Amino acid sequence: MNLEFTQEELDFQKSIRAWMRENVPEALERVSALGNMPTKSQQQQWERCLGKQGWLALTWPEQYGGPGWTATQRYIFDIERAMAGAPPTSPFGVAMVGPVIYTFGSPEQKERWLPGITSGETLWCQGYSEPNAGSDLASLKTRAERKQDHYLVNGQKIWTTQAHWADMMFCLVRTDPEAKKQQGISFLLIDMKTPGIEIRPIYSIDGHHHLNEVYFTDVEVPLENLVGQEGMGWTIAKFLLTHERTTIAGVADSYYALARMKQAIEDVPYYTDKPSARRRMAELEVELMALEYTNFRTVAATDEGKPFGPESSGLKIKGTELQQKMSQAMVEMGGLMSLAWDSSSVVGNESFNNAPRRYNFLRACTIYGGSNEIQKNVLAKMLLGL
Amino acid sequence: MEFNLSENTTMVADTARRYLKDHYGFVTYNEQLNQASHCDPARWQLMMELGWLGLPFPESIGGYGGELIDVAMIVRELGAALCLDPYVDLVVAPGKMLEYIGTERATVVLQSIIKNDEKVACALYDCHAGYSVHKPTASIRDGKLSGQKSFVPDGGCANRVIATARIGDELALLLVPLESCEITRYRALDGSRYADLVFHDIEIDDGMILSRGAETSRVISQVIAWLQALDCARMYGAANALYQRTLEYAKTRKQFGAAIGSFQVIQHYLVDMFTDLQQLESMLFMVSVKAELGNAQERDRACSAAKAYYADKAVKIAQQAIQIHGGIGVTEELDIGHYFRLMTHCSLTHGHRDYHLDRLASLSEVNGLG
């Protein structure tokens, strides 16, 4: 057993830390420090900056634009990125559709779509959930009818994060309404500027617009935008669930949140109950450490060529629960200061004024990406054999 | 021991529920969220006709002599309806303050509140003092008031505030016209209207000093106890509404070809919500009786226990309601998320969980387990 980074890894860490110090824009750092989310242009500027370094598609094979790092290096990068106050990369391009395209796509598709993802130029969104297909995703109904030279898409998606920012959507559609539930589903790439697409914003309880409903009315999608074969959609969706998820626990960003919390307490000179705040933060830190070391094991296993499968569902469960706990602790420690929802001036301390927004937003993290109840079903079935 | 509500209290609760059903809904709430003033003249008139403005106060000064439990039933229904009408903030809080002060001058102001002639709010908190209401940072020196107040729940429509301040070592309650303060207004977490006030050397004449000295502290503690009990009442109303809606949703929402309520995990979640709700109701009855007691220690122990319990369990019910609803639960479009914000809000007013656990521990220390 060896719990230390090697000298090379430590050097790597040093160089990444130095680079982050130089390159994370101050405005972006401030957004993160207050627990807010970047604007589209802030996010995209940052991703382009990473793209120029070849540091966007970290898990990809080098031939498609990955940096050729080990899982340990990727983990180090993620920590340094978060602690420097930079946001996580939007997952839809680099973590989701990219790996699908280089695994299942045609040479033409790879050539056409991958460069835009590794450079940060093309923004993607995920068209999975529908009003009646949430946890039961396979009951989705959005129809793609095969015509002469295109698919005709009709239907509706919901909870589509950043659809209003996106250039492209990867979408699960039903190509064969006769086939059994999972088998009639296909994986389609849709240009968001195609006529017939309508986006309606959904405001979430943090008061912001991240989510959308997307309506398709006779949307014509070129046949060459089908990834894999017709009917392969479900296989592809399942592939994504087992694709490397060593950062799914959100350890890096939780460490950053903990540091912010400590800072906020120190920033309020008249904070009345520091001992109990500190004790609470220590409790959270213990949980975070347990998560971190579990996460380390998945990282090490990946580097040994034995990547985790369904176990990563456990990381998602623990990681999201901890994110929620931490954001709740922040709100509670803020006391009355957490009540100032939309004051134009600071009431006591800005981080505490903002805390409820993040807390509210994070209620979704045990729901999105497969609710924690579904994750537990996966573990029970695939790992425990129940 | 007896846990039945009196006929009178039951009637107050039923009337409140009916009134809100007829005059307030999620649409009204959403409109109110965006209004600068939360005092709707028509509803205020109706509340007066229902007797709510006089209910918390003794008959001797023109009130209807209700008990805390009666007011709690109204506030429970306001919570259940998500209603933002500042009844507690502009009637109960300032009114009880004035009643407990009990001077002739205070009674005159109280009577104008009961008659709906004016709106008065309480300014008890500031950022520096936190929950320590007996140690305000605002002070009077040479007849001039300086300092600030935050988190003043004035519904966007009060014309005067009852504010705490220090005069030397003494604690005082002052009646300050809002027009003499610098005001920053904002929306609070639950959607209600808050104000932050800055006092720039406001001239204080004797007529503005409602109370000073040792008595003042006692008055404030009595009022805060009421407000803590009413926080619990509001949270109970919201928790019950969340439970009912979530249960209904679990019965109707279908996934995997079945109502999600047929899944064991959802059943257990709902049973947990139900049993917690039952205990929350017990704590509400307990605190509604004890928060009115003359024995300060027993009163404060009850209030701290109830607030600490609510900040844990009622908040958990709200979190679970969102989880069971899934995506739709985190949107502004459904009332679930709004109840959730209300719940977080009330868990932080008049002392959060840590504050109350500490207070309970210190109150218990002095006299053993008694």
Image: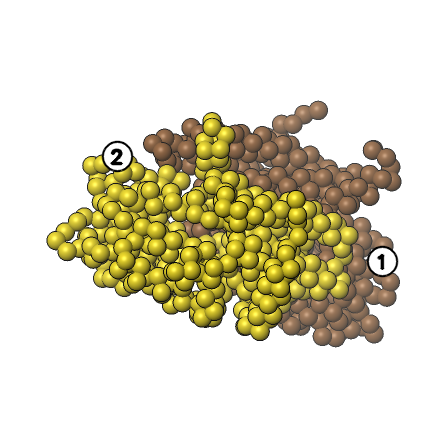
Chain colours: A yellow, B brown
Q: Is residue B57 in view?
A: no
Q: Is residue A286 in view?
A: yes
A100 horizontally vs B26: left or right: left
Q: Nearer the viewer, residue B151 or A290?
A: A290
> Which amino acid type corresponds to the residue marked 1 in the rendered image?
Gly
- Number of the label disc, if any, that sits on residue B213: 1
Q: Residue at x 56, y 54 (%)?
A: A72
Image location of residue A199, percent across then percent down: 32, 58
The number of discs equals: 2
Mark 2, secondary structure of its residue: loop
Q: Nearer the viewer, residue B280 or A206?
A: A206
Distance Cα–Cα, label 2 vs label 1: 79 Å
Image location of residue A304, percent across then percent down: 53, 46
Q: Which mark is in front, 2 or 1?
A: 2
Instruction: Identify residue for label 2.
Output: A180
Where A224 falls versus A27 (above or below)?
Answer: above
Q: Residue at x 85, y 58 (%)?
A: B213
Chain that bears disc 2: A
Image location of residue B38, percent across then percent down: 53, 58
**Quarter occupied by the N terminus of chain A:** top right
Q: Nearer the viewer, residue A340 or A89?
A: A89
Q: Residue at x 83, y 74 (%)?
A: B142
